[in-house]
Amino acid sequence: MPASRPRTRTHTRARSRDEHKELTRQALLRAALRLLSRNSFDSISLREVTREAGITPTAFYRHFEDMEELGLVLVEDSFGSLRGMLREARSDPAMADDAIRRSVQTVVNHVNDHEAHMRFIARERHGGVRRIRRAIERELELFANELALDLSAFPIVHGWDSDDRRMLAELIVEVMVAAAADLVDSDPATHPTRVKRAERQLRLVTLGTLAWRPKR
Amino acid sequence: MPASRPRTRTHTRARSRDEHKELTRQALLRAALRLLSRNSFDSISLREVTREAGITPTAFYRHFEDMEELGLVLVEDSFGSLRGMLREARSDPAMADDAIRRSVQTVVNHVNDHEAHMRFIARERHGGVRRIRRAIERELELFANELALDLSAFPIVHGWDSDDRRMLAELIVEVMVAAAADLVDSDPATHPTRVKRAERQLRLVTLGTLAWRPKR
DNA sequence: GGTTTCAGTGAACATATGTATACTCTTACC
DNA sequence: GGTAAGAGTATACATATGTTCACTGAAACC
């Protein structure tokens, strides 16, 4: 028999009870993502999600107040994994040279590993639910901010004011997102071509950067 | 009394009967566009559309077999007006210089005059209805093709192979679409800033074009 | 002028939705 | 070991949906 067990409420955090709750919560999120591969967010119903997750409609409310709340969590999750991946990629010392190919490859890998998440973002970025749109746009802004900061390290943009750097960062993010959206909605056989195109487009942008005059 | 009336069936094309039909058809399309400002296409119902248009649900079938068919017509209409506007802009001899600012302005004007159409395109480009996505993507490809052809006239891309020109054209279209999507979903007071950003991004692309080596 | 055509109506259907309420039964706590 | 908590259930509701069918009445045709 176990001699000691956590006694105070604060220490008894994750026990079997909470574990199971978290499990079906994740089941709901995954079920929603699965449905979102075929339909847009505001066309899938609470009941569909619970059906797909294998629970009763009313049990949904034990986890989320709303479908919208579920959607906002999906946004967080989608960007969470992506953010980690990019941060890791940036800290790679080999990143300095061949930054374009490596960055694109990072996004491609993420599309492969988290296809549903990326499709969700592409689909709902301009989708029919205001708060979800806003949440996604906010996350993309944060990305652009981080990227703009990182760009300072590159000699190419030396002397640029922060406004120009942001403009550049937003362009790059836009091209990346477009590439991802392109990939999740196309025949995998055509992916190599599409990836190369994105790389060339970013190379073109880089060349433009070299010629940019920071003055006004 | 009217002495003569068109007699043959072929000449009796547009009479009061067909006119009225066309009228309520347009009413249906406009109603759908209105609803699409707030929701995504696959979340609005046939009944909603007819309610908004002021007719009976069953009358819908006199005009479209399906909501999907209605959606495909919306895609055509949305691009129809845009295509005309751009063709006009390109034929303008003043276009040669200051092409960037004029192109962007053309898109901005179109966003102002056909906001609902542009929002529809932005929303459904990656939306939940396959055939509509495909239709929009096809239209955008046609745009890129036309643009790639037009670009040949600019000395900047002299000596480029058609593949590189297409890559460039697709980048430009992407930036334009992103700008439009940005405008239709933001506070009008912020529009000037956003327009300027798009212009600067296109200028950056142009600079990149100057430095691009057509070899390989 | 009489007949045909057909855009729009009205009622009915089977089925789906979000949510409220009262419940069960396992786990966590003292 | 007895009790409280709470994740998931079962039932029920008012309301919405797409589509059917038989209809009406005005315009179009001969």
Image: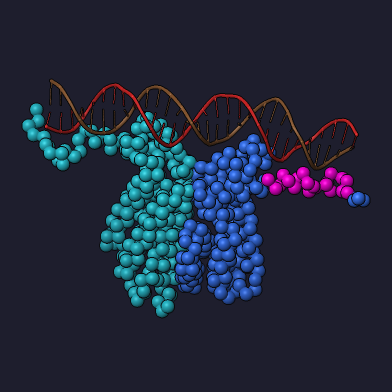
Chain colours: A cyan, B blue, C red, D brown
Q: Looking at the figure, which quarter contains the N terminus of chain A?
A: top left
Seen at 56% across and 44% down, the residue is: B131
Seen in the picture, residue B51 relative to B111 is either above or below; the reply is above
Q: Residue furthest left?
A: A3
- Quick check: is A39 in the magenta stretch? no
Residue A108 in percent (x, y) is at 39, 52
Q: Which residues are magenta?
A: B5-24
Residue B12 in percent (x, y) is at 83, 47
Tell me if B197 is positioned left or right of B65 in this view. left
Seen at 43% across and 60% down, the residue is: A174
Q: Is residue B137 visible?
A: no
Front residue (pair B202, C17): C17
Seen in the picture, residue B28 relative to B181 is either above or below; the reply is above
Residue D20 in percent (x, y) is at 64, 28
Tell me if A127 is positioned left or right of B141 in this view. left
Seen at 42% across and 34% down, the residue is: A47
